[in-house]
Image (cartoon, grey):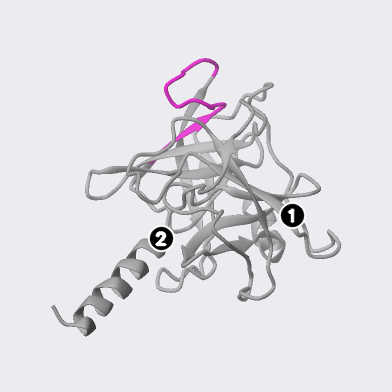
Amino acid sequence: MSIHCQLLILILALTLDGQVHTGEVIGGREAVPHSRPYMVLLEQRMPSGNKKNCGGFLLNEDFVMTAAHCQASSYTVILGVHNVYSSNGIQRSSVVQTFPHKDYDETDLSNDIMLLKLSSKANFSTNVQPIALAGQGDGSLPKSCIVSGWGRTDKHIKHMSLVLMEANVTISTECEKEKSYCTEGETGPGNGDSGGPLVCEDGKAYGVVSSGYLNKYSYAKIPDYRSWIDLIMN
């Protein structure tokens, strides 16, 4: 095999390994059980009949936020879960209506944000609580944030994590795009965590996990969508 062919294969392998559209918490740690009671696990039935998972987070008793690219023919919303094999205290709901952003572009994943209306109201408890959203008036750009989810914990592992994982990330202005935040580094989201929240120092959700490419991770910027979110929810 020529050196040029070997180099091409290496570039393709790195590119395919780095480009993800549904998130994994890489380089993270197990979250304290139920310390993030707003976290939602989405089980999705795809049009093909296959199932996959995304993350999400609870906004009130009726609505969950996730990424628009987590599109499916049907959803099961699981609340109050830490270990996916434990059914203790969990709540399940189907979705009665989906609200992907009207300007969502599946090619470049811009406006990658969606609201899901639950078919039955969430019952708030110690393990099930909504999270507040950041608004335009929430001061300067946050720096230190946390992502969490049940996605893969290693790029070479095919199955999802059995427990909720979390990782610290730092927002960077070097790779940001319009209406999005960006983080960089070995630690961040990838396969299985899309739709989960980017939660910063004040405990509010600032972003929605969207995509990753070569250790750069993108999040839909919630403050830029507040008028749209409030319109749908009200």
Residue matched to label 2: 20
Quadrant where the N terminus sits is: bottom left
Q: CA distance from mark 2 to mark 1?
A: 23 Å
- Magenta range is 75-89
Residue pictured at 22% horizontal, 76% vertical: 6
Front residue of 190/51: it is: 190
The percent position of residue 216, horizontal first and vertical second, equals 54, 66
Q: Mark 1 belongs to which amino acid? A: Ser
* Relative to 202, 4 lies left or right: left
Residue pictured at 69% horizontal, 73% vertical: 173
Front residue of 116/217: it is: 217
Residue matched to label 1: 144
**Label 1: how many Cα within 10 Å (few below 14, some 14–19, many 20+):** some
The percent position of residue 196, horizontal first and vertical second, equals 56, 47
Front residue of 123/155: it is: 155
Residue pictured at 57% horizontal, 43% vertical: 28
Q: Mark 2 belongs to which amino acid? A: Val
Asked if residue 154 lies in the magenta stretch, the reply is no
Residue pictured at 42% horizontal, 59% vertical: 21
Prevailing secondary structure class for the magenta stretch in the rendered image: loop
Say whether disc 2 or disc 1 marks the residue closer to the N-terminus: 2
The percent position of residue 83, horizontal first and vertical second, equals 49, 25
Element marked by disc 2: loop
